Amino acid sequence: MDIQLPQIIFQMINFGVVLAALTYFIYKPVLKLLSDRRKNVAAAAEAAAAVMQEKEDLERVRENTLLKANQKAKKMEDEIRREAKADAKLLLEHSKEEITAKEIKFSSELAKLKKEELKSMEVEIKKAALTVAEKVLGESIDAKKHQKLIDDQINEIIESL
Amino acid sequence: MLQINVASAIPLSDIQKKKLESSLQKKYSKEEVAFYYQVKEELIAGLNVSVAGKLYDTSLRARLNQLASKI
């Protein structure tokens, strides 16, 4: 088999043309495609990172908002508790005052009632004492004593004339 | 005429009446005097004499009333 130079050259040119065609139509587009894909991936990663950052920011905002809401709720709760405590204290004081006033009124009424009762008892005792005295004296004075008493009283009246 | 009312828890004896009348007549000698006697058991004991709008009450009832008012 002879080596034919022109054939070799032709083959070489042919190979060069094919290589050039392949380079131009396949290799460059594929490189460009890869490059574009890399850019797209990078852009997507960047977007994802931005989204993640945004998510973290939102999360932080959410936590802050939640914290503030909790603090506000706690503050409101404390305030309500304080107000309720003050109201309860006021109510208690008011009730105490009311009870004291009622106690004073009751004591006063009781004292008045006691006084009236004592007065009534006193009158009854006086009446009873006089009734007893009348009965005892009336029964204990016999006719002789009575005559003597009248004699004495006549003298008394005569002296006072 | 001067009216003298004598009330007593028991009837007065004549001696008692005379004693009382003589004293009162002496006191009111310028006037004609009439004595009226009555028995009032409510006086309990003793007597009272009412003369010229004045009452001399020495009865036990009067004494007890005085005591009651003092109490």
Image (cartoon, rainbow, N blue to C red):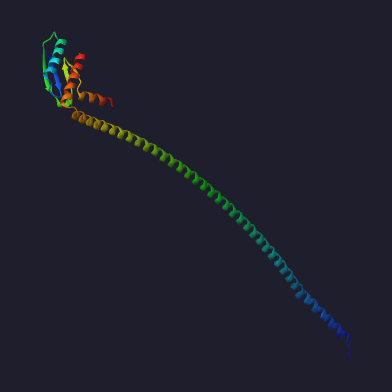
Residue A131 percent coordinates (x, y): 22, 31
Vertical position of residue A160 compared to residue B67: above or below: above
Q: Could you tell me which residue is drawn at 16 percent across and 18 percent down?
A: B49
| Position in image of residue A57 (x %, y %) | 64, 57
Q: In the figure, B13 relative to A75: above or below?
A: above
Residue A118, position as x, y percentages in the image: 31, 33
In the shown orientation, is residue A126 left or right of residue B40? Answer: right
Q: Residue at x 18, y 30 (%)?
A: A139
Q: Residue at x 55, y 49 (%)?
A: A75
The image quarter in which residue A40 lies = bottom right
Q: Is residue A1 above or below residue A94?
A: below
The residue lying toward the viewer, choosing from A93 and A40, is A93
Residue furthest to the bottom in view is A1
In the rendered image, the quadrant that contains the C terminus of chain A is top left
Residue closer to the observer: A54 or A71: A71
Quarter placement of the N terminus of chain A: bottom right
From the viewer's perspective, tell me whether residue B52 is left or right of residue A69.
left
* Near-viewer residue (A12 or B63): B63
